[in-house]
Amino acid sequence: MSQTVPRDPYEVLGVARDADEGQIKKAFRRLARTLHPDVNPDDPEAQDRFREVAEAYEILSDDERRATYDRYGHDGLRQRGMGPDVEGFGNLSDLFGAVFGQAFGGGGGGRSGPRGGGDVAVEATLTLEEALTGARIDVEFEAIASCETCTGTGAAEGSRVTTCSRCGGHGVLDQINRTPFGEMVRRVTCDVCQGRGRTPEKPCPDCRGRGLKPTRRTLTVDVPAGIADGQRIRLTGRGHDGEPGAPAGDLYVVTTVRPHERFVRDGDDLVTVVPVQAPHAALGHELTLDALDEPLPVEIPAGTQPGHTILLRGRGMPRVGGGRRGDLHVVVDVVVPKRLTDRQRELMEELAASLVDAPQDEDESLVGRLRRLWRKH
């Protein structure tokens, strides 16, 4: 799918021109997983489609290149020697480097040892009840694992691993680009060993000589009580595997707490609304609140007004790691009956006849009361 005129990288990745770094990386991750040649071995155009996506990502993921492209377009990138370089970017190892971090390829200086694994982020959705008590949940995610067949060496059984003849074991090459401003040297990943510095004499048939292969993992995670929406749980060494002898990356579980239909969380506090019949609010009443963890008795004082808040200390959310629980704020919603029986109407009329206009508080004007009620509303 070779093209004479390069396409707009924003169009290639399907992102807006004001997209941030996270949106750009997410778009590339999504496209790379579906267009990569290793995923489409029978599609002769997969290489070109993936290369186009990789070029777009290389431009937009670099602040200087992106700014140059936004101002001068592809011509400006070429004139400044900043055009994308993806000559070795059509293999799974380089994809790992772009999507999962430099631990799996892509530039830099010579290497002094095996590369460690990259980190993984996965989302876990919880109910508010689970956040209150803590929970054990299963998370499923994609990760790069060491090939079991070759134990991560990349070599087939009986085959040796030797120093790369192209880069001399450095894993990188110096590429000279001639520009109107002179020659510019750029360090790129070796296209033979893909940055490893070593190559197998005979590649492993399962991982094609990479030593690493994508896999799906399922892990049970202990979520602590009191976890909040957006908080992360770090599991050391449960991310992408590294090369033999190098540590694995970390797994970050990002929590999403679903909204509750009756309770709103405010930090460690909880807020809820309970309906109370007008006579009960006037005379006083005791009701049972179906809280998140257990039923709670709530005393409604006589003369309770609409919007009055009853504070139940220590009945909110626990704090992660221990400590006093937050509070539960119970907001009273005084309900005026809409339908009355004949007898109820008689009683209400008798009550209304016996009441006089409520006296205005001496220390608060009518306008002051309206302002206070409006602020509360």
Image (cartoon, rainbow, N blue to C red):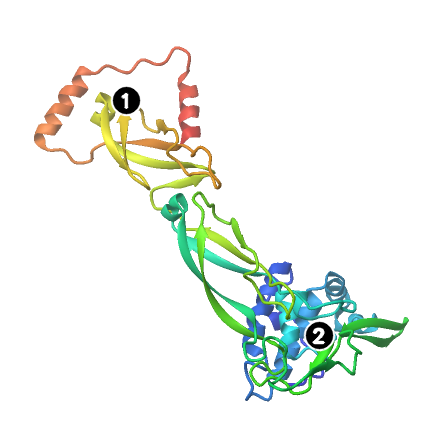
Residue 350: x %, y % from top left = 13, 20
**Towards the viewer: 145 or 39:** 145
Q: Secondary structure at mark 1?
A: loop
Crowd around label 1: few <14 · some 14–19 · many ≥20 (10 Å)? some
Residue 226: tell me if it is visible.
yes
Crowd around label 2: few <14 · some 14–19 · many ≥20 (10 Å)? many
Residue at the limit of the structure toward the left, as seen here: 343
Residue 156 appears in which quarter of the rendering? Answer: bottom right
Say which residue appears at 53% left-offset and 51% top-offset: 232
Q: Determine the CA span between mark 1 and mark 2.
A: 74 Å
User: Image height check: is 151 above or below 285?
Assistant: below
Residue at the limit of the structure toward the top, as seen here: 362
Are dots 1 and 2 in contact, CB under 8 Å? no
Say which residue appears at 46% left-offset and 34% top-offset: 323
User: Mark 1 or mark 2, which is nearer to you?
Assistant: 2
Kind of residue at disc 1: Pro
Kind of residue at disc 2: Arg
Q: Which residue is mark 1?
A: 301
- Tag of residue 223: none
On the rendered image, what quadrant is the C terminus found in? top left
Q: Is residue 339 left or right of residue 49?
A: left
Q: Which residue is mark 2?
A: 196
Q: Is residue 128 left or right of residue 355?
A: right
